[in-house]
Image: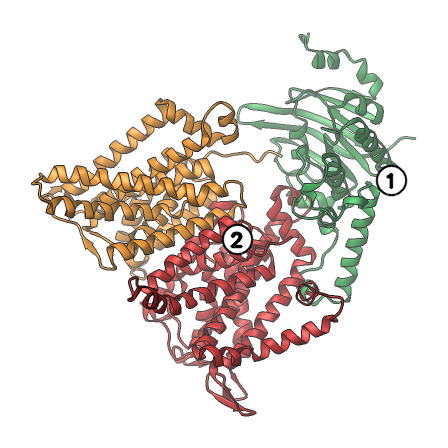
């Protein structure tokens, strides 16, 4: 990690801790800066970017480290979100506390990861991609239809009134005033999510530089050779699926509690593809690249949404093109251009 | 001194569809020797390697290492039991450095899991240190110090071959199976390889060697077996093999009587 | 009414469209090893251009017979789609031929998003109805209904697939394509212009896609800017099911997927004791795909390639 800071602060003159302090302070005051300059909506967008970053780091374990192309990754996000929604909402009348749900979501999503990973172990490359895609769709279709004969997921309507995180009886979605500063729900969640993201980054770095991380990369580079080096490729691949799924599960839980509402619509194939784009665009296998890719893809389209209308009005006199579709056109163009100019991603490993 | 048999290959037969790739191969490899396996292209040498290392399943027959039957086990358990291999068409982990490649080889003799990797407690740190030390010493052993920090795919051909050997040695094998380690090497590299193989034998590791360089095999091996069209046509000391008429026929052509 | 036969008929109709689209995926995959995610959008563009051409020709100063309008509109759709596919390959895929494997996948996704939204800008968000160019007639056959449109779809698909196979296996161009699929490097050493072959593959695939687009919108009587994505996905699934890279496999996979989907949808309620309804149609299709691949990882017609060490 210190390398990163050295890059920013030029090493020699400034001791590394100056960099740490600077970044910590920046991260702490960021939501207030964002709110002051761009409004509260942007703090929420920032929060969603943090959730996506967790999700992308989870997928990076599967795709980036182990080289297993997973196009149904959003299913684990969905599992995490619905686990939270079912355990902390009026749907079943359960209201478990967050410190109980997070580990449950972690484990449930991990189990799903193993269950969905197990049948695919013999598949390579694009066959794996299409099967995982199928699994992702299956999960979504079940969520969409499990409202009868027994109502579990509430079908396409989704589950509402999901409990937010409560610490000592205080709900994080409410606004609080601390030291004269107003902490909205978006602010409070920002810190929770930031903490979880940093924890995820920490775990990813540790895993990457371990015996298991090396085994994953070995499988990615040459599965046969990895076997010949005594790696139990079946178990190590399942572990990658499970770890990736678990992070997705936590991110999903956070999504459910932050939004207070989940429905199958949030877990469509396009979302899986979006997360994959974040990983690949940023630089597959490189944790910092993945985070960069996530923030670009989570924030850029929002910026385009905000600016494309006014710019057209100022330059062309009226809004010629619907800002929503223009945003998607530019998004598609950006994906193509970035890949053409930097095929290994914006910030590749090595 | 009579050496003990370490690896027993008995009656191994492999058919692909109707094609018989290997038929009834018996080989006994003695502990601490260099056992050469030669034969013309397509004789079934690599197929035999793939069976021994668990990549293929034999149609018939068995293979024991130190009296433990390994036939039909998955590759990783065979490595764990003490048989490591290299590949004819080098299969390194391209983007990893030389050192990391060798560290992967230590995988099978180490056991820190997810929790250890994340918490990095004392045991995990010590194991990681051990892995690094062992990998460094093996890099040193095969003489790759200068380039161990480079991505494996950028190494020269000869260095890649030696790195593969170091990686296989990292699994702490009893027997190491080398599939044409001298292929594509220049004379200097070949003579370095010869020294390396002698050193490995001196350190008590048995070597099973497939090689096309007949000179290298004859000068190095204690025992040589010859395969032709999936059949073992001869086995013996290099001098016996050199004068075996069947072998001469197989290599120079002509009808087998 | 015979439900089973009815579902078989519906499945065959659906399946022949899948097969046409699947061919485009499988040809590109066979040569480039790339999932051309934008292929589904080419199908959509085909349908949209056809409808636009019909309304232009029909509303123009010339009085044309309906069959003339159809022929010209289909040709226009094929022409536009071919040009589109040619440029997609040139712009988004060719520069990345030696790039990391996932890079062209991302540009393909980008292309798909781009085309879908441009199409939305051009043709709007609303569903467009298929014009009444011919009288729809319905026949009863052993207790099941068949329309002339359905018969036409199946007939055209079979004819096109047969001619594609003939082109691939009997002509010089086809031989060049097969050689390139086998190994682009060696094909180029043998004097095959690989770039031309690849462009041609995209163009042929796009032609098939355009026809499929017309057929599918005729079948459902509507077209929509988002129709291509799911259709493309299903077709790709069909190609994988059959064994990707294999032309016959794509056809078999397409027909099979169509049959599975419609028979599955018809019977899934009975099979699960009413627990699952026809909403689970897609689950059924994907489950079959997963089961087939688990037991035969290279698809139904795919060759078993021994992993040589």
- Is A65 rendered above or below residue A300? above
Density class for disc 2 (Cα within 10 Å; few <14, some 14-19, many ≥20) is some
Above or below residue A151? Residue C176 is: above
The residue carrying mark 2 is A118
Quarter occupied by the C terminus of chain C:
top right
Element on which disc 1 rests: loop
Residue B79 seen: yes
Chain C painted colour: orange
Residue A141 percent coordinates (x, y): 36, 60
For this orientation, the residue located farthest to the left is C63
Q: Is residue B215 left or right of residue A302?
A: right
Farthest residue toward the right?
A: B1
Pointers 1 and 2 in contact (CB under 8 A)? no
> Badge 1 is on which residue?
B203
What's the residue at 42%, 48% (across, down)? C108
- Label 1 marks a residue whose chain is B
Indicate the secondary structure of the residue bearing disc 2: helix
In the rendered image, residue B160, in percent from the top left (x then y), is placed at 72, 38
Residue A184 falls left or right of residue A14 = left
According to the rendering, which colour does chain B have?
green
């Amino acid at each position: 990690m210190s390398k990163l800071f050295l890059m920013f602060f030029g090493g020699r003159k400034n001791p590394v801790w100056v960099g740490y302090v600077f970044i910590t302070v920046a991260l702490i005051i960021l939501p207030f800066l964002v709110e002051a300059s761009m409004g509260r909506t942007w703090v929420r967008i920032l929060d969603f970017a943090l959730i996506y970053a967790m999700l992308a780091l989870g997928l990076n374990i599967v795709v980036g480290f182990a080289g297993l192309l997973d196009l149904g990754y959003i299913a684990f996000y969905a599992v995490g979100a619905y686990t939270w929604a079912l355990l902390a909402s009026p749907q079943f009348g359960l209201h478990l506390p967050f410190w109980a749900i997070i580990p449950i979501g972690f484990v449930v999503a991990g189990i799903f990861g193993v269950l969905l990973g197990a049948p695919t172990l013999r598949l390579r490359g694009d066959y794996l991609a299409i099967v995982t895609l199928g699994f992702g769709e299956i999960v979504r279709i079940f969520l969409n239809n499990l409202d009868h004969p027994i109502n579990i997921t509430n079908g396409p309507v989704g589950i509402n009134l999901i409990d937010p995180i409560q610490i000592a009886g205080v709900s994080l979605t409410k606004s609080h005033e601390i030291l004269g500063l107003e902490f909205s729900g978006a602010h409070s969640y920002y810190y929770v999510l930031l903490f979880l993201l940093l924890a995820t980054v920490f775990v990813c770095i540790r895993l990457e530089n371990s015996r298991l991380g090396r085994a994953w990369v070995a499988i990615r580079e040459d599965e046969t050779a990895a076997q010949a080096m005594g790696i139990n490729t079946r178990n190590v691949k399942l572990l990658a699926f499970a770890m990736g799924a678990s992070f997705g599960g936590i991110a999903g839980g956070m999504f459910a509690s932050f939004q207070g509402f989940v429905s199958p619509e949030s877990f469509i194939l396009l979302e899986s593809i979006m997360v994959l784009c974040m990983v690949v665009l940023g630089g597959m296998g490189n944790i910092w690249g993945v985070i960069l890719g996530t923030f670009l893809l989570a924030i850029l389209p929002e910026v385009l949404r905000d600016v494309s209308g006014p710019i057209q009005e100022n330059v062309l006199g009226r809004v010629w093109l619907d800002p929503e579709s223009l945003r998607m056109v530019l998004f598609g163009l950006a994906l193509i251009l970035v890949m053409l100019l930097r095929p290994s991603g914006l910030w590749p490993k090595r | 001194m009579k050496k003990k048999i370490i690896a027993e290959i008995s009656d191994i037969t492999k058919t692909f569809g109707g094609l018989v790739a290997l038929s009834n191969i018996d080989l006994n490899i003695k502990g601490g020797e260099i056992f050469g396996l030669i034969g013309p292209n397509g004789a079934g040498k690599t197929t035999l390697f793939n069976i021994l290392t668990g990549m293929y399943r034999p149609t018939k027959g068995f293979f024991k290492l130190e009296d433990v039957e390994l036939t039909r086990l998955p590759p990783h358990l065979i490595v764990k039991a003490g048989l490591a291999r290299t590949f004819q068409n080098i299969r390194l982990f391209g983007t990893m450095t030389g050192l990391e490649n060798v560290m992967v080889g230590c995988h099978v003799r180490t056991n820190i899991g997810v929790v250890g990797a994340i918490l990095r407690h004392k045991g995990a740190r010590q194991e990681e240190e051990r892995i690094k030390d062992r990998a460094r010493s093996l890099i040193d052993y095969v003489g790759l110090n200068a380039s161990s920090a480079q991505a494996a795919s950028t190494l020269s051909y000869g260095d890649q071959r030696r790195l593969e050997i170091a990686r296989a040695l990292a699994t702490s094998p009893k027997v190491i199976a080398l599939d044409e380690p001298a292929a594509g090497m220049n004379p200097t590299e070949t003579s370095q390889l010869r020294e390396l193989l002698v050193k490995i034998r001196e350190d008590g590791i048995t070597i099973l060697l497939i090689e096309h360089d007949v000179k290298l095999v004859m000068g190095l091996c204690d025992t040589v077996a010859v395969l032709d069209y999936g059949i073992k046509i001869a086995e013996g000391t290099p001098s016996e093999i050199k004068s075996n008429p069947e072998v001469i026929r197989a290599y120079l052509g002509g009808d087998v009587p | 009414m015979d439900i089973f036969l009815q579902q078989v008929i519906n499945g065959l109709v659906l399946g022949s469209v899948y097969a046409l689209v699947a061919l485009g995926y499988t040809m590109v995959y066979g040569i480039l090893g790339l999932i051309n995610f934008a292929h589904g959008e080419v199908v959509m563009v085909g349908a949209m251009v056809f409808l636009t051409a019909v309304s232009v020709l029909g509303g123009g100063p010339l009085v044309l017979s309906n069959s003339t309008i159809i022929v010209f509109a289909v040709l226009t759709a094929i022409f536009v789609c071919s040009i589109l596919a040619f440029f997609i390959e040139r712009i988004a895929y060719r520069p990345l031929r030696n790039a990391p494997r996932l890079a062209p996948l991302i540009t393909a996704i980008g292309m798909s998003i781009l085309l879908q939204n441009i199409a939305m800008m051009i043709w709007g968000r609303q569903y467009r109805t298929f014009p009444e160019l011919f009288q729809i007639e319905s026949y009863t056959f052993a207790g099941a209904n068949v329309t002339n449109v359905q018969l036409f779809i199946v007939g055209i698909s079979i004819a096109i697939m047969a001619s594609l196979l003939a082109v691939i296996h009997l002509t010089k161009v086809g031989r060049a394509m097969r050689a390139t699929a086998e190994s682009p490097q060696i094909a180029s050493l043998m004097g095959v212009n690989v770039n031309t072959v690849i462009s041609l593959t995209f163009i042929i695939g796009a032609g098939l896609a355009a026809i499929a687009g017309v057929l599918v919108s005729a079948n459902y009587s509507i077209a929509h800017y988002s129709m291509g994505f799911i259709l493309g996905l299903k077709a790709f699934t069909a190609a994988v099911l059959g064994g990707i890279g294999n032309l016959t496999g794509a056809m078999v996979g397409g027909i099979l997927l169509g049959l599975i989907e419609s028979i599955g949808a018809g019977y899934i309620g009975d099979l699960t004791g009413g627990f699952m309804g026809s909403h689970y149609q897609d689950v059924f299709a994907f489950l079959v795909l997963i089961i087939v691949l688990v037991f035969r990882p290279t698809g139904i017609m795919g060759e078993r390639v021994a992993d040589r060490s």
